[in-house]
Amino acid sequence: MAYATVNRFRHYYEWVTSGQPQPTGKPVMVFIHGWGGSSRYWESTARALSDTFDCLLYDMRGFGRSRTNDQETPILAQPPDTKEELSYELESYAEDLASLLDALGLGQIYLNAHSMGASVGTFFLNLHGDRVERAILTCSGIFEYDEKSFNAFYKFGGYVVKYRPRWLYKLPFMDRLFMQRFLHRPLSGEISRAFLDDFLMADYDAALGTIFTCVSKKAAEVMPDEFAQLKVPTLLVSGEYDIIIPPELGRYAAELNDKIEYFLIPNTAHFPMLEDAPTYLQKVREFLAVTSSAQV
């Protein structure tokens, strides 16, 4: 297990390459996961692309194996003086990524980000676009602010984050029930259980804090301009039946910038890269102008 200390926090990371434990000299693709998850759900996509890219997976601060509540792998290398110094703004997570790349000595990369991670990725593209060749944003978009619905979301989200007893992981079929809202096609039990495990283990402050920064009046106001400013060629992928980030929100974002290519994957929801991996990978390779070694 590898950790890098960036911005005073320890971040878990790992390489997925073609048979080697370290980078092989191929172009680097960095993957960013979404809210409540970890880089574990990107592993199959990374393995499929490792014939062309050295794939870097990492867990964002407060999630996965970069948790604050894990005594064996503490996230804080040098605790801040006050709790108020901790930031869960999307821009802060983008700067975490920039520092991680610096710590690992990485220059130009390709970026592949999902859901909340795609919002972080969008900020990263505008803050550090000179470091990115091309980007894929999966299940992202622009929503309108509605005070009543947002407050209801905060109340529900706060309840969900607060009441996450660990014993839920042991209940039969709880993983399927947990994932039902996110999927149109079922995933394997192993993947679903990993999702549930990541959600139950996520740091409380990070999970709650990012609810308020991802779905907020500020985000609704600034994200249209963030998408409009993108200068990096970007593929924005939506799932046809995604109720978390409906496809029309992604289509709206893509219409703001001719650098963004929009692609809808039928019969999928919030995890199109897992629900229909062949279609997702084919489109990604087409966008990146690369072919699989299996196809040569």
Image (tube, helix red, strand yellow):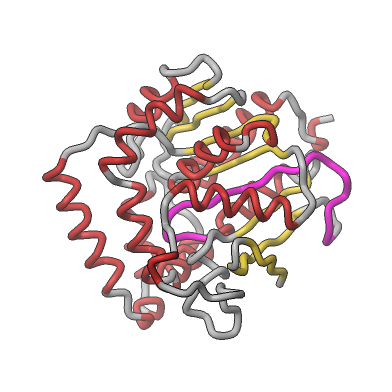
**Picture residue at 59% right of the left edge, 84% below the top:** 72
By secondary structure, the bulk of the magenta-drawn segment is best described as loop
The relative height of residue 79 versus residue 123 in the rendered view (above or below) is below
The N terminus: image quadrant: bottom right
From which residue to which does the magenta span run? 21-38
The relative height of residue 107 versus residue 238 in the rendered view (above or below) is below
**Picture residue at 53% right of the left edge, 75% below the top:** 79
At which x and y percent is residue 142?
35, 32
Seen from the viewer's position, the closer of residues 213 and 57 is: 213
Q: Quadrant of residue 161?
A: bottom left
Judge from the rendering whether residue 10 lies leftward or rightward of residue 121; answer left or right: right
At which x and y percent is residue 295?
79, 31
The relative height of residue 20 versus residue 231 in the rendered view (above or below) is below
Q: Is residue 26 magenta?
A: yes
Judge from the rendering whether residue 12 lies leftward or rightward of residue 228; answer left or right: right
At which x and y percent is residue 28?
75, 43
Seen from the viewer's position, the closer of residues 240 and 73 is: 73
